[in-house]
């Protein structure tokens, strides 16, 4: 998936001419890194890694289209010797009476969208304040937010759930939305803050001189520049929420009212783990959405992530 | 116990690739047992007059949390239909494979379900100890039902410190040996009625045809690998040492490696570690450890072995075309005791516990402990389900092995004992016991070391 196409090695003389033109250190390093990464050896290793990484997923795909009896009696790698193809697993997963995949699919969407939008909106505002509004204790508060990232979510599960129960929220979408927002905010604020800080101060100051207030600066000056960062974090958060099992399982359980797709898939294998022809098909159905999102937005993903987190 | 998983295909692929990766987690599976039936479309027949005792529960909701997921969950839900229709209550069913981990979390957070089905008495005991306020003692109607329709032992498993908390729901019987009726007839073999006869029969099989090993066995079951071997030992302890010693052993009143237990394990080894006896169609003794439990009996219809000790729920693992019946392709006989009068029976089941004393919850709990429910459940279930409720109508059970299991469960001459590993602390019952039994098979650790290792792992408190 992530194989790097072999490119020509950078010509040393070319580097030299650029040096003459006066490159920043970061640019020089980038060129050197490109040279190293483009070596045939590195490409070879990357290809091997990509293949190894894809083999289990590929096996899952093959398994999902094999008939149940075949899955039971032989491994997927024997598929070519005995090619039997069926879409029965998929039709049972998607339209079978007991699985109600559609409901869970909708639940997943209903959970994911607010769980992505809420933390990004809040984090943008917070990041702006941290970056461009001087107030007392700003650094301290920022360090505190940053430090929150080290709190493992597992230790927060029980106290949070207890709190939700005392508020009477259990079993509603609010629990998942709130939890995902809480867990996402420290990283979101940190990433977006760094990105905002990278924007030249002169730009903001110029807007100020022209009479723009914080709201105008935020919406008219910063937001357009922040799109890649927002998109990258959006994808990041989307993938995390869509694939999340732990939070959903702990906070909402497995009822059809609120549980997302991941919870349903975890149950697909059946009480005695016998149904894994369904499991493989179900897993693939659930994979499709994040895959589409990732492929459609992947250039933002890489660009935004680098821009926000690595300061040159 | 028995989280039955298998992931040959993907696990191997992943390990070949040197990647633990996600898929091992997804690969819970074995081909074999679908729903344990699937003929569960029949609508239960009922008369609402029988349900008047539960009162009018219009507009109320009871939440049920269990470890039983689809497709078996569908049959569960269908069996509540009469209750829902007649009383007006709504039953909200939720099944999860992470039940055992999630239930304490919910109790801790004060988010308890109204009713939970607990698959192990040991788990029930720890719940009562850890959450004395959450677990509700059974109501009057429930206690009456329990005493009337269940044998004393079953009631005992739902009782902690003299208080009844839980009533039995489903049940299974593990003391079975699967065989092929036609192969037995061809060779003139008789069903053994004592342990010695079973050994003699085995010897005769070896003599008649040394190429075909009489027994086939497999204990591979994903991260629960080893559990079928623990059932072997439990079954034999019941036969060589007796139910009383068995109870002491399970409750840790005698050490795990008591000489009587060592002797029982030696007896098991007499079959499972005897190169002449095992492993029909699958290889040598070591192959027991790697053979998937749910496929290891396939040698019986294939003619590569004659005997396979497994529970009644193994019926769901036979290939679809095979007829499970006394005159069919495969069937099971009772694993005999030391003498004809000595009839210990090893089994398991799940238990209904309530976490609320609301009227509708108590009514539903009473319903679940009644023969009404057992019969409604039998009607909507194809095969592979029984209850120890003696009010269950035997004719409603749709497979002959289910009927046989039910007969044994309700026959007073059989001494029932609950699966020992389900009653032991988790560190042993779902941990060292499984692991050490695997080491015992392969690479062939001796019995004494095996049992002392388990004894050493028993939690001190």
Image: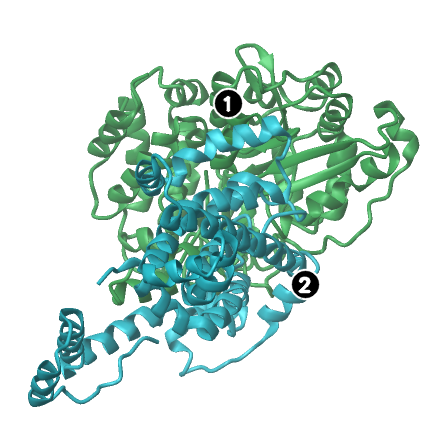
Residue depicted at x 63% and y 31%: B113
- The quadrant holding residue A312 is bottom left
Q: How crowded is mark 1: few (under 14 residues within 10 Å), some or many (20 or more)?
A: some
- In depth, the one of A140 and A262 nearer the eye is A140
Q: Where is residue A229 in the image (x, y as percent from the top left)?
A: 40, 63
**Residue at 61 percent of width and 64 percent of height:** A93
Q: Mark 2 points at which residue?
A: A96
Q: Residue A186, position in %: x, y?
A: 39, 45
Chain letter of mark 2 equals A
Please identify the quadrant where the N terminus of chain B is shown.
Answer: top left
Q: Which residue lies furthest to the top in this view?
A: B162
Q: Is residue B148 above or below residue A66?
A: above
Mark 1 and mark 2 in contact (Cβ < 8 Å)?
no
Marker disc for residue A239: none
Does residue B298 appear left or right of residue B349 in this picture? left
Left or right: residue A48 compared with residue B52: left
Specify the chain shown as green. Answer: B
C-alpha span from label 2 to label 1: 36 Å
> Hey, which quadrant is residue B242 in on the image?
top left
The percent position of residue B198, horizontal first and vertical second, equals 43, 42
Give the labeled residue for mark 1: B127
Residue at the spot 61% in from the left edge and 35% down from the top edge: A170
Q: Mark 1 lies on which chain?
A: B
Discs 2 and 1 share one subunit: no
Residue A55 visible in image: yes
Q: Which of B293 and B426 is in front in this view?
A: B426
Foreground: B306 or B73?
A: B73
Secondary structure, mark 2, is loop
Which image quarter holds the C terminus of chain B? top left
Examine the rendered structure and indicate whether residue A58 appears above or below residue B270: below
Secondary element at tag 1: helix
Residue A209 horizontal side relative to residue B411, left or right: left
């Amino acid at each position: 998936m992530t194989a790097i196409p072999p490119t020509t090695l950078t010509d040393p003389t070319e580097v030299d001419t650029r040096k003459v033109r006066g490159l920043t250190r970061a640019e020089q390093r980038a060129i050197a890194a490109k040279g190293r990464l483009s070596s045939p050896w590195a490409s070879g290793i990357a290809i091997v890694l990509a293949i190894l990484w894809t083999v289990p997923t590929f096996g899952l795909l093959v398994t999902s289209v094999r008939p149940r009896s075949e899955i039971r009696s032989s491994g997927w790698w024997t598929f070519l010797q005995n090619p039997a193809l069926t879409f029965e697993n998929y039709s049972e997963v998607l339209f079978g009476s007991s699985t109600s995949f559609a409901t869970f699919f909708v639940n997943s969407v209903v959970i994911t969208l607010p769980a992505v939008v809420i933390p990004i909106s809040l984090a943008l505002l917070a990041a702006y304040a941290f970056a461009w509004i001087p107030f007392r204790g700003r650094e301290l508060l920022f360090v505190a937010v940053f430090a929150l990232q080290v709190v493992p979510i597992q230790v927060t599960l029980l106290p949070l759930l207890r709190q939700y129960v005392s508020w009477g929220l259990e079993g509603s979408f609010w629990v998942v939305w709130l939890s995902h927002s809480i867990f996402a905010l420290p990283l979101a604020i940190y990433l977006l803050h760094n990105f905002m800080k990278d924007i030249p101060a002169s730009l903001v100051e110029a807007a100020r001189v022209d009479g723009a207030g914080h709201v105008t600066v935020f919406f008219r000056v910063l937001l357009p520049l922040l799109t890649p960062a927002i998109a990258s974090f959006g994808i990041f958060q989307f993938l995390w929420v869509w694939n999340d099992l732990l939070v959903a399982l702990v906070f909402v359980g497995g009822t059809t009212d609120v549980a997302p797709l991941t919870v349903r898939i975890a149950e697909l294998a059946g009480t005695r783990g016998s149904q894994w022809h369904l499991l493989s098909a179900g897993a693939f159905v659930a994979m499709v959405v994040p895959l589409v999102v990732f492929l459609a937005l992947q250039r933002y993903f890489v660009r935004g992530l680098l821009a926000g987190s690595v300061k040159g | 116990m028995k989280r039955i998983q298998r992931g040959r295909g993907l696990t191997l692929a992943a390990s070949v690739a040197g990647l633990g990766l996600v898929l091992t987690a997804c690969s819970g599976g074995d081909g074999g047992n679908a729903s344990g039936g699937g003929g569960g479309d029949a609508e239960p027949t009922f008369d609402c007059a029988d349900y008047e005792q539960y009162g009018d529960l219009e507009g109320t909701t009871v939440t049920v949390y269990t470890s039983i997921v689809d497709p078996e969950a569908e049959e569960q839900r269908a069996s509540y239909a009469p209750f829902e229709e007649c009383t007006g209550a709504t039953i909200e069913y939720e099944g999860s494979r992470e039940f055992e981990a999630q239930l304490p979390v919910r109790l801790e957070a004060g988010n308890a379900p109204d009713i939970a089905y607990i698959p192990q008495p040991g788990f029930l005991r720890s719940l009562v100890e850890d959450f004395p306020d959450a677990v509700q003692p059974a109501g009057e109607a429930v206690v009456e039902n329990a005493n009337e329709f269940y044998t004393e032992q079953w009631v005992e498993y739902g009782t902690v410190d003299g208080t009844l908390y839980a009533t039995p729901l489903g049940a299974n019987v593990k003391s079975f040996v699967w065989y092929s009726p036609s192969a037995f007839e061809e060779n003139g073999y008789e069903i053994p009625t004592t342990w010695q006869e079973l050994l003699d029969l085995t010897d005769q099989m070896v003599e008649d045809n040394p190429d075909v090993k009489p027994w086939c066995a497999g204990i591979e079951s994903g991260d629960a690998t080893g559990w079928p071997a623990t059932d072997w030992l439990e079954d034999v302890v019941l036969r060589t040492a007796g139910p009383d010693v068995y109870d002491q052993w399970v409750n840790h009143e005698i050490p795990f490696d008591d000489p009587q237990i060592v002797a029982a394990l030696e007896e098991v080894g007499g079959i499972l570690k005897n190169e002449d006896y095992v492993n029909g169609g699958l290889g040598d003794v070591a192959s027991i450890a790697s053979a998937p439990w749910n496929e290891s009996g396939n040698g019986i219809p294939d003619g590569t072995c004659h005997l396979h000790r497994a529970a009644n729920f193994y019926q769901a693992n036979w290939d679809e075309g095979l007829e499970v019946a006394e005159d069919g392709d495969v069937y099971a006989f009772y694993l005999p005791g030391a003498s004809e009068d000595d009839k210990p029976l090893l089994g398991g089941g799940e238990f209904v516990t309530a976490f609320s004393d609301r009227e509708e919850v108590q009514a539903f709990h009473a319903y679940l402990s009644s023969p009404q429910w057992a019969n409604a459940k039998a009607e909507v279930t194809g095969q592979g389900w029984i209850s120890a409720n003696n009010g269950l109508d035997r004719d409603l059970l749709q497979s002959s092995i289910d009927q046989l299991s039910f007969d044994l469960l309700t026959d007073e001459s059989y001494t029932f004992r609950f699966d020992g590993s389900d009653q032991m602390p988790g560190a042993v019952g779902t941990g060292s016991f499984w692991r050490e039994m695997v080491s015992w098979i392969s690479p062939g650790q001796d019995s004494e070391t095996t049992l002392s290792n388990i004894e050493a792992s028993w939690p001190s408190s």
